[in-house]
Amino acid sequence: MPARRSTAATLLTIAVAGAALAGCSKKDDAASADAVKVTASDSACEVAKTSFPAGAVELSVQNKGSKSTEVYVYAAGDKIVTERENIGPGTTVSIHAEIKAGEYEIACKPGMTGDGIRQKITVTGGAAPAAKADPRLAAAVEAYRKYAQEQADATIPVVTQFAEAVKAGDTEKAKSLFAASRVGWERTEPIAESFGDIDPKTDTREDGLEAGQQWTGWHKIEKSLWADGKITDDDKKLADQLVTDLKDWQSRIAKAEITPTSMANGAKELLDEVSKNKITGEEDRYSHTDLSDFAANVDGAEKAYELLKPVASEKDAALAKTLDTEFAAIKVLLGKYKQGEAYTSYDKITEPERKAFSDAVNSLGEPLSKLAAAVVVTG
């Protein structure tokens, strides 16, 4: 989150957080008896059990702090196994995931910043019982992997053109390619984030830098193009590095750890991304191409849902009906701002319009948070 923001952005964030909290406080998730309880506060992250069996795991997270928090499960190298953002004060949420045996850390991030307050955990045994696996879920995972690979494959030519424009000093062409170069990434960002090391190099904003971290990637070049109005020799080197890093992302997708619950949780993460960064205008703060990223996040979330829907609709038909309705509504809303292949510049979007986006995201995000529970494989 940024160290500073405009008064309008601050007021909007308060409104968004308030709307999310109002919804969640009435609809706290009901945890199962086997859930691992995590109590988050402004200064602690207490995990009731630090050792539990592999397979389908449910975390029941209660935020007793005064700030919104995030909860992550990290494998070695800070690879994200699962996460949940925007957990409001006084809210309890359930996070469903399929976790293999191994050593992990659970991190709570009060204020949704930093490395978090961490607790080591041990997951014992093997994987989820094969006998319980649904072949439709296995097919959904492979279809989603194919989708993610297609998005990465389509990204590389566009980001290469973007990089070539930067290296040629062609500011206007680079600007015209910036948003398009990010679409595939934004549609499948949870997979990229799960690798741990690629996202910080490619998609970090200046105020998100860790101590000693060099600023690289899209947003550094974005600032040069729009705020500084010139391309430096350093930007030209960073353009080549961006292509290299994204090719690394492209090559890793085939071996990415994907499960039905990670797909479902990833869909929710994409909506959290919209709520935290796009609606406030913080993501693409210089180019104001936030709505392009917003639409790509929604596309990616909907794809994951559509692939999981055959199973989810059997277990929770009402949830599937609600998700169908809310996805349709948010796409209609976005469609009003589509201009050819682009979207209205976000600095032209009024506060009431941003509030409408916030309401639509909250209406979709709440039922989407229940999708993982509808597809989890239990032993």
Image (cartoon, helix red, strand yellow):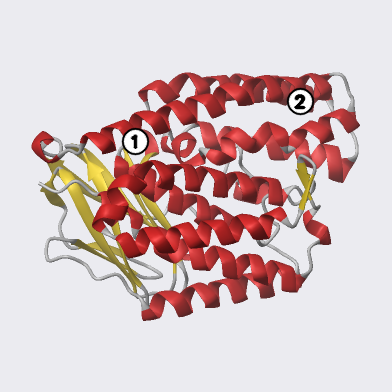
**In the depicted structure, whether residue 326 falls above or below residue 125:** below
Q: How crowded is the residue under tag 2: few (<14 C-alpha within 10 Å), some, or many (20+)?
A: many
Q: Position of residue 262 (x, y in %)?
A: 34, 43
- Residue 77 image-quadrant placement: top left
> For this view, does 178 lie left or right of residue 58?
right
Q: Residue at x 85, y 45 (%)?
A: 227
- Look at label 2 and name its amino acid: Phe
- In this view of the protein, can residue 210 be seen by the observer? no
Q: Residue at x 81, y 58 (%)?
A: 347
- Distance between mark 2 and mark 1 Cα atoms: 33 Å
> For this view, does 118 lie left or right of residue 352?
left
- What residue would you read off at disc 1? 140
**In the depicted structure, whether residue 23 falls above or below residue 322:** below
- Residue 229 image-quadrant placement: top right
Toward the viewer: 302 or 88? 302
- What residue would you read off at disc 2? 162
> For this view, does 327 lie left or right of residue 77?
right
Q: Earlier in the sequence, mark 2 or mark 1?
A: 1
Q: Position of residue 236 (x, y in %)?
A: 78, 22
Q: Position of residue 5 (x, y in %)?
A: 71, 64
**In the depicted structure, whether residue 30 falls above or below residue 57:** below
- In this view of the protein, can residue 143 be seen by the observer? yes
**In the depicted structure, whether residue 93 falls above or below residue 273:** below
Image quadrant occupied by the N terminus: bottom right
**2 vs 1, front mark:** 1
- Look at label 1 and name its amino acid: Ala
Toward the viewer: 99 or 294? 294
Q: Residue at x 79, y 48 (%)?
A: 286
